[in-house]
Image (cartoon, helix red, strand yellow):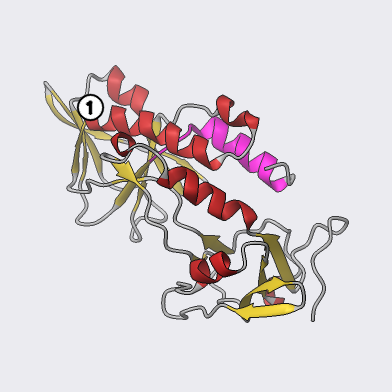
Amino acid sequence: MPSLSSAEDNKRGELFCYPIKKIHKILNNIEALDAKYKNVIDINVNPKFIIKDGGSFPEQFFLRFDNKIIDVPVDKTNGTTPTFLTETYKYPKSEACILDPLRSKRPKYDEGLYFEMGLSPFFINNSGYHDIAELEKGARDGKRFYREMILSPFKVFMPNTDHFAIHHKNFQDEGPPLFAKTSDGISEIKPLFYDGLFLVSLRELRNIKAKGLIVNLDSYDIKPIVSIKYLKRFNTLRKAGKI
């Protein structure tokens, strides 16, 4: 069995493992949230691998508990792992392991192969129009969701989720077509960009007295998120292994 990546070389190694004990706590925290926080935004738990570097899915994905190996199949057509959650509840003290020799020399927290749980809260409405009241409530509720994912006293310092990230598979290199509806008509909005995310600021919408945000796409996802300043800070802490 290949060895784990070490803190000394800070590389992924052929086998990259991490504990899963926090996953259930986070899911239980979110499930316990009052329904009033889930009528505008909510999560859709769907553990899956996302390839961001044009490479391949891992050679193997499994749980390891003591000397027991529990294989978790990966659907190579879409990256989903249908049995992952079921197996983690059976083995809550296990660790998830990714056997991926092709990326062994990359930094420990490289995201070329990204495992997503689906814990980000997205707006339930994706009709193409979001009025300002909906956006403001989504921003407030988003902060509450993310606080439940921080399993430490530092959760009280969770910053406001006063930006909105728009996801669409056909707009990875250029921003999606966004417009603000105001009393004067419709005006185009140029989104901010950071780390693959296209963002709109709630403050910007308020400054132009927007009545709502128009997303001119047939299908998309939109979620409340922190500002770029805090995204940079979180990325720095994560890469340092502090969160």
- Please state, as top left, top right, bottom left or bottom right, where the C terminus lies in the image: top right
Expressed as whole percent of the image width and height from the top left, the position of residue 152 reads: 64, 35
| Image-based side of 113 in relation to 97, left or right | left
| Image-based side of 56 in relation to 65, left or right | left
Of 4 and 155, nearer the camera is 155
| Image-based side of 164 in relation to 27, left or right | left
Number of disc labels: 1
Residue found farthest to the right = 8
- Image: 56 above or below 35: below
Specify few, some or many for label 1: CA neighbours under 10 Å numbering under 14, 14-19, or 20 or more.
Answer: few
- Image: 77 above or below 202: below
- Please state, as top left, top right, bottom left or bottom right, where the N terminus lies in the image: bottom right
Q: Quadrant of residue 186?
A: top left
Over which residues does the magenta segment extend? 224-239
The residue under the point 28% across, 53% down is: 220
The residue under the point 48% across, 43% down is: 29
Q: Is residue 226 magenta?
A: yes
Expressed as whole percent of the image width and height from the top left, the position of residue 104 reads: 74, 71
Q: Quadrant of residue 55?
A: bottom right
| Image-based side of 34 in relation to 147, left or right | left
The residue under the point 58% across, 31% down is: 155
Element class at badge 1 = helix
Q: Amino acid at mark 1?
A: Ala
Of 151 and 139, nearer the camera is 151
Magenta stretch prevailing secondary structure: helix
Expressed as whole percent of the image width and height from the top left, the position of residue 18 reads: 69, 61
Q: Label 1 belongs to which residue?
A: 133
Expressed as whole percent of the image width and height from the top left, the position of residue 128 reads: 18, 46
Q: Is residue 68 magenta?
A: no
